[in-house]
């Protein structure tokens, strides 16, 4: 008997000084196999890690754009059950990479549902103010993406000509 697939969204806060009581907002968007927004209600069940309050079971109401919002804090998970095959979903953390948190996503946050799927958002709190001041794109693969500067291995194409420096030979570029 086909019962559909489960889609779980989890939240973890790490790092010294991270606020484990803070609620983070997630936008959940769903479209059908014809790329049309799903304007429907989806029931979910809350769960949590030990010593963390479970989020209440509830219903996510998707609007005419196929979008709805849920809030989770550290250690909490919600699971939507019985979602049909080939539903396109996209889960976005609204506060990702803000307020000294670096967000990493484990699992497919933007895909077509073909099996039970877990998507976990990890926010690592960092007190490094320099990192917080940089505007980085959402979900960087590395903690920081500084430009790589390497010394040139050959002189520039048009170096300044000085008496001490002969003009470079023209040739391979």
Image (cartoon, rainbow, N blue to C red):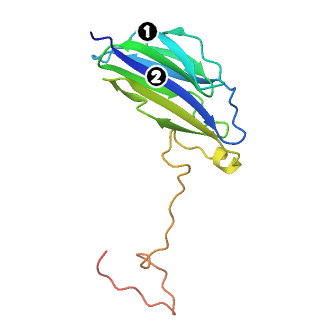
Residue in view at x 29 percent, y 78 percent: 172
Q: Residue furthest bottom?
A: 164
Residue in view at x 44 percent, y 19 percent: 29
Q: CA distance from mark 1 to mark 2?
A: 22 Å
The picture places residue 139, in percent across and down from the top left corner, at: 50, 39
Report the number of discs: 2
Residue in view at x 49 percent, y 69 percent: 150
Tell me the quarter of the picture where residue 14 sits: top right
Residue in view at x 53 percent, y 26 percent: 10
Left/right placement of residue 89 relative to residue 86 reads right
- Relative height, residue 67 to residue 148 (above, below): above
The picture places residue 4, in percent across and down from the top left corner, at: 33, 14
- Relative height, residue 17 to residue 10 (above, below): below
Q: Which residue is mark 2?
A: 8
The residue carrying pointer 2 sits among few (fewer than 14), some (14 to 19) or many (20 or more) residues within 10 Å by Cα, namely some
Name the one closer to the observer, 150 or 161: 150
Q: Which residue is mark 1?
A: 64
Q: Quadrant of the C terminus?
A: bottom left
The residue carrying pointer 1 sits among few (fewer than 14), some (14 to 19) or many (20 or more) residues within 10 Å by Cα, namely few
Left/right placement of residue 121 relative to residue 118 reads right
Kind of element beneath mark 2: strand
Ranked by sequence position, the earlier of labels 1 and 2 is: 2
Kind of element beneath mark 1: loop
Left/right placement of residue 131 relative to residue 66 reads right
Q: Nearer the viewer, mark 1 or mark 2?
A: 2
Q: Quadrant of the N terminus?
A: top left
């Amino acid at each position: 008997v086909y019962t559909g697939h489960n889609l779980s969204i989890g939240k973890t806060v790490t790092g010294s000084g991270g606020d484990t009581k803070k609620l983070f907002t997630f936008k959940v968007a769903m479209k059908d196999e014809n790329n049309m927004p799903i304007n429907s209600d989806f029931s979910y069940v809350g769960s949590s890690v030990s010593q963390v309050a479970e989020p209440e079971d509830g219903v996510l109401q998707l609007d005419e754009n196929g979008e709805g919002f849920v809030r989770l804090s550290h250690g909490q998970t919600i699971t939507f059950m019985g979602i049909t095959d080939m539903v396109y979903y996209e889960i976005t953390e609204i506060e990702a990479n803000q307020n000294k948190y670096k967000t990493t996503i484990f699992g497919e946050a933007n895909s077509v549902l073909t099996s039970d799927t877990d998507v976990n958002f990890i926010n690592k709190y960092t007190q490094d103010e320099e990192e917080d001041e940089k505007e980085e794109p959402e979900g960087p693969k590395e903690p920081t993406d500084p430009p790589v500067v390497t010394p040139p291995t050959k002189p520039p194409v048009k170096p300044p000509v000085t008496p001490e420096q002969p003009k470079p030979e023209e040739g391979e570029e």
